[in-house]
Amino acid sequence: MDINRIGFIAVEAGRIILENGGETYRVEDTIVRICTAFGARHAESFVTPTGIMMSAIGKDGSTISIIKRIKVRTVNLEKICKVNDLSRNIYKYVDSEEEIIKILNEIDSTPRYGRRKTVFFSALAAGFFTLLFGGTLQDFFLALIIGFFIKLTTIYLNNLSINEFFINIVGGAMAALLALIFNQIGLVGNFDKLVIGSIMLLVPGLSITNAIRDTIAGDLMAGMTRILEAFLVAIGIAVGNGIMLKLWMYVIGGVH
């Protein structure tokens, strides 16, 4: 196969993994596996959370270098799993270039869970986190409502391509505001547990996990980048929460 086609297929597979929350070392491994399976004499790749750089040498000595900018990042473990399985069974498709491109396109276009299902289970997650941290059953149902509105709002803002930092500020502020309203009415059993459980929807658990895994794997740049990203998300949540609490105390009074 032409080295240019090999490079295109390898980078496309890597892009799908990276855009959907995969670790950088997994992307590098996938690119090298695909290039090697299709007959490249040598392949190297360097991946960061926002870009892919790779080069390969074909059987005839021709070389190729590709740079791919990653602008969209989300979480879809199903896509990562499918591309990962494909790269480890790539030998089955070495004689069918069109087949592997078709499979990659199908994986890339796999629809996510619907909005209703996403919002419903996000609300459940907020409720159970509240129970986990020591909230009452009454707090659980209040967290369901807060989680519902937080997820609905973040989905809407994401569709408008709003910066992630400001989305987390809005989410943190919304968690505090709704908890304060419920508390003012007298429905809240444990105000702090309700707020903490609700904002867990915004905590970047996957980024933190990937940061640790990338660092352990020796990808220090990617690891530090993801840690900084998680730190900024935490700051956004804290800023939103803090602003709303301060405004409430200034306008209404203290939290009882």
Image (cartoon, grey):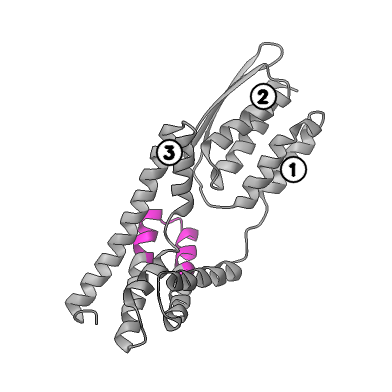
Horizontal relation, residue 104 to residue 188: left or right: right
Q: Quadrant of residue 168?
A: bottom left
Please indicate, yes or no, whether residue 163 appears anywhere in the rendered image.
no
- Across and down, in percent, residue 228 comes to 36, 44
The residues bearing labels 1 and 2 have C-alpha atoms spaced at a distance of 19 Å
Q: Residue at x 30, y 61 (%)?
A: 238
Q: Is residue 87 above or below residue 6?
A: below
**Disc assigned to residue 4:** 2
Q: Is residue 197 above or below residue 3?
A: below
Amino acid type indicated by mark 1: Ile
Quarter of the figure that contains the N terminus: top right
Q: Name the residue under label 3.
A: 223
Highlighted magenta segment, given as a residue range: 151-171
- Across and down, in percent, residue 132 comes to 45, 70
The residues bearing labels 2 and 3 have C-alpha atoms spaced at a distance of 30 Å
| Viewer-side label of 1, 2 | 1
Horizontal relation, residue 3 to residue 27: left or right: right
State yes or no: discs 3 and 1 in contact (Cβ < 8 Å). Answer: no
Classify mark 1: helix, strand or loop.
helix
Q: Mark 1 points at which residue?
A: 103
Q: Which of 120 and 135 is in front in this view?
A: 135
Quarter of the figure that contains the C terminus: bottom left
Q: Residue at x 78, y 35 (%)?
A: 98
